[in-house]
Image (cartoon, rainbow, N blue to C red):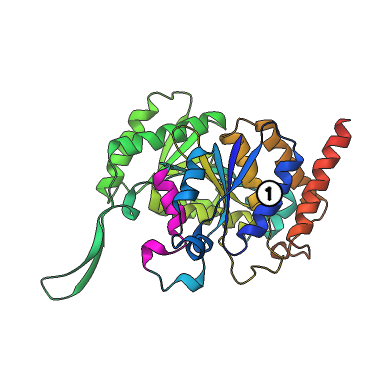
Amino acid sequence: MKIALFAGDGIGPEVIAQAVRVLRALDLPGLSLTEGLVGAAAWRAADHPLPEETLAIARASDAILFGAVGDFGCDHLDRHLRPEQAILGLRRELRLFANLRPAKAIPALVGNSALRPEVAGAIDLLIVRELNGDVYFGEKGRRTTSQGLRQGYDVMAYDEAEVRRIARTAFEAARRRQGRLCSVDKANVLETSQLWRDVIIEVAAYYPDVALDHMYVDNAAMQLVRAPGAFDVIVTGNLFGDILSDQASMCVGSIGLLASASVNESGQGLYEPIHGSAPDIAGQGVANPLATILSAAMMLRHSLDAGAAADRIEAAVAAALDAGARTRDLGGTLGTEAMGDAVLAALEQQGSLAA
């Protein structure tokens, strides 16, 4: 059970430390933790946001637990040296093509959502986002038009193999959940989306037990606010998924609670909280570590075949929140370490109840 720990920048080291405390408390057999530098911390130490030494650690691991990258002090650097290139480089080098973003209401925190409690309380969905294609990786640049005007362009493109691969991942996820999959596209105006829809339908023939429907992205955005409980699994491309996954996260109530996974075809994955490096609160000991702790739970379940341990972590987080534990972003006063203590206490309580 080889886990790479890439804490990164800002609050990354603070929240990773709490997740490590929880992992060690589980007494997992064969647990091996290896640290590596990424982001601005890596650039300052090794002149690159993703040094070869870190990449070697990643390749040798079964899974990666990632903190956050980002530092305003690096904004002057060439784009390929900026901290954010660490995450893009890991996705590319490890062929992490599928982003899994769960959004589930936590009963104790339903009141934190901007949605009505009865609407927010029904949220339990998974967004499967393709990571390696779309406008983020298509041809891009600037040019001058025939009228002498500056023009920027980004090419949106998917080939059928890329769509088929993410479709299989999404159908398998739906099969493990409630058996419903919604494919989100813009097939009424985009040729890329029409190919996407065609291939999704082809793959659906191999999953007769999964109910498939299609939705245009603008309607999906509206329905995530109007009736998010109607969704089980959503599959979509890189651009649409980037937007919809953040929207779904905020419907739950706080980005400090939400985990994320990026996986490849072998099951190796990178697991991270969806919040950023938050340099404005870094070093103050007030960051919410729950999203990172829950990312560790996702890691155990999806890459390390330790679902029972993942269940224990998730139950401990829920118990801590039920008992009133709250960090500042949730309206409470607990610091980062104190919230970690609350989760560890809930884990210990599980053990005493079992005894």
- Percent x, y for residue 81? 40, 63
Give the extent of the magenta segment. 78-93
Number of callouts? 1
Give the residue drawn at x 48%, y 30%: 172
- Residue 262 in sight: no
Point out the residue furthest to the bottom here: 148
Magenta-colored stretch includes residue 63:
no
Give the residue drawn at x 32%, y 40%: 196
100 left or right of 292 in image: left
Indicate the amino acid at tag 1. Ala
Magenta-colored stretch includes residue 86:
yes
Q: Quadrant of residue 288?
A: bottom right
Above or below residue 43? Residue 189 is above
Q: Give the position of the C terminus as an image quadrant.
A: top right
Above or below residue 314? Residue 115 is below
Q: Give the position of the N terminus as an image quadrant.
A: top right
- Residue 290 in sight: yes
- Of residues 282 and 234, the one nearer the viewer is 282
- Percent x, y for residue 142? 23, 67
